Image: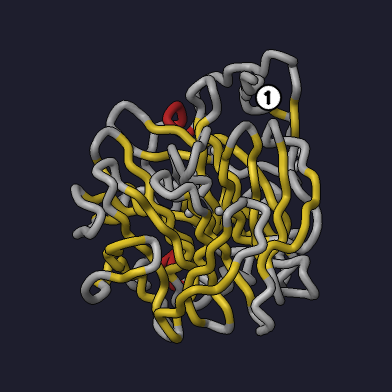
């Protein structure tokens, strides 16, 4: 149930499962990731386009980051990627940062946010291009708010608390500069959107976008959570996770709209990332694009099919077909070409 955005960001098959075959930030070029399930989808559409190999021939395989971690988001800033996630701070009592220059090799960094209260989940960090400040949208004890820092490595200081009985906040900045905060309202797991007058000031009332309805969203608990907004060819793609996050049936789908406030239409081939071939409970992540234009999904998986919170960070490809449909995959223990990341110019 507990819960990866925009700055300078470079921004993831068929599987078997219950009668169907399978095919938010990182901010900046942001997206969130997926594996596709669609009963009637041609097999060719279920496969990603050929990978652009890393210039150094580097490969990687999942797990990307070991440890009890979940709900990752990645911010790219001045040649470094900063990953924030749930876990690894006295259980879930704070947020730690991990850094990388290539999205594959990660270094454990300091604790950047410690509110003094338990259940610190799903951090979402965004850099304001106007002020240059960094904003961490937090969930603490099922309340959503924001903290601010002058650096991506913190420390972040709390400045506002908005929504009680809420989780999984994600800030999206549209091309016109307008801000939208997506979050999940409990107890019925409704995905909401809140217009923002500034990074710390809501504007008007929040609007409901989705609630648990589809079979895959209600298979192991009635859940729609982990919203992540991305824009592709003028359309808005709301990525989200469904079913219980501590179950192997946790999965990812998306809905599409012409405006960031909806109305949103669920993709008919949902869920697009789900369990299969040694992968359990993939979900709740972000997306980013490498320097070759390839999209990557950074998300979490469960280690086993047991009902538990034993999760780790993973990364896989994400892609669109010619009709604008979103596809993805989830892998474990499979070597694949690393993202193409060019050296930062001095």
Q: Where is residue 48 in the image (x, y as percent from the top left)?
A: 51, 28
Classify the position of the N terminus by image quarter: bottom right
Residue drawn at 73 percent across, 56 percent down = 312
Q: Which of 163 and 177 is in front in this view?
A: 177
Q: Where is residue 149 in the image (x, y as percent from the top left)?
A: 57, 59
In the picture, measured across the screen, residue 202 lies left or right of residue 295, that is: left
Residue 108 visible (yes or no):
yes
Residue drawn at 39 percent across, 46 percent down = 130
Q: Position of residue 330 (x, y in %)?
A: 60, 44
- Which residue corresponds to mark 1? 337
In the image, residue 338 sits, relative to residue 234, either above or below, namely: above
Residue drawn at 72 percent across, 35 percent down = 104
**For the view shown, which residue lies furthest in the top direction?**
55
Q: Quadrant of residue 123?
A: bottom right
Residue 33 visible (yes or no):
no
Q: Nearer the viewer, residue 37 or 339?
A: 339
Residue drawn at 48 percent across, 24 percent down = 293
In the image, residue 22 sits, relative to residue 196, either above or below, namely: above
Q: Is mark 1 on a helix, strand or loop?
A: strand
In the picture, measured across the screen, residue 311 lies left or right of residue 46, that is: right
In the picture, measured across the screen, residue 160 lies left or right of residue 102, that is: left
| Pointer 1 local density, CA inside 10 Å: few below 14, some 14–19, many at least 20 | some
């Amino acid at each position: 149930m507990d819960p990866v955005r925009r700055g300078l960001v470079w921004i993831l098959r068929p599987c078997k499962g219950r009668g169907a075959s399978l095919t938010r930030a990182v901010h900046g070029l942001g997206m969130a990731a997926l594996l596709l399930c669609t009963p009637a989808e041609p097999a060719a559409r279920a496969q990603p386009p050929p990978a652009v190999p890393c210039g150094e021939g580097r490969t990687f395989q999942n797990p990307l980051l070991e440890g009890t971690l979940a709900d990752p988001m990645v911010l790219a800033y001045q040649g470094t990627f900063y990953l924030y996630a749930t876990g690894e701070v006295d259980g879930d009592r704070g947020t730690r940062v991990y850094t990388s220059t290539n999205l594959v090799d990660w270094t454990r960094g300091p604790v950047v946010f410690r509110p003094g209260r338990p259940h610190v989940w799903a951090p979402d960090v965004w850099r304001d291009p106007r002020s240059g400040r960094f904003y961490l949208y937090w969930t603490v004890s099922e309340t959503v708010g924001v903290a601010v820092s002058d650096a991506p490595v913190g420390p972040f200081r709390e400045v506002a608390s908005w929504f009680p009985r809420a989780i999984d906040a994600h800030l999206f900045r549209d091309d016109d500069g307008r801000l939208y905060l997506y979050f999940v309202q409990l107890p019925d797991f409704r995905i909401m959107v809140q217009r923002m007058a500034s990074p710390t000031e809501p504007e008007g009332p929040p609007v409901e976008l989705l609630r648990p309805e589809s079979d895959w969203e209600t298979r192991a608990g009635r859940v729609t959570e982990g919203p992540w907004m991305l824009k592709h060819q003028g359309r808005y793609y709301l990525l989200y996770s469904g079913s219980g996050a501590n179950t192997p049936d946790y999965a990812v789908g998306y809905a599409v709209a012409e405006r960031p406030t909806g109305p949103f239409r669920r993709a008919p081939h949902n869920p697009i990332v789900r369990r299969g071939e040694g992968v359990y409970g993939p979900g709740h992540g972000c997306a980013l694009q490498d320097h070759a234009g390839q999209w990557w999904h950074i998300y979490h998986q469960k280690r086993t099919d047991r009902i538990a919170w034993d999760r780790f960070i993973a990364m896989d490809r994400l892609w669109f077909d010619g009709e604008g449909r979103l596809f993805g995959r989830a892998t474990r223990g499979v070597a694949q070409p690393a993202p193409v990341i060019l050296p930062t110019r001095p």
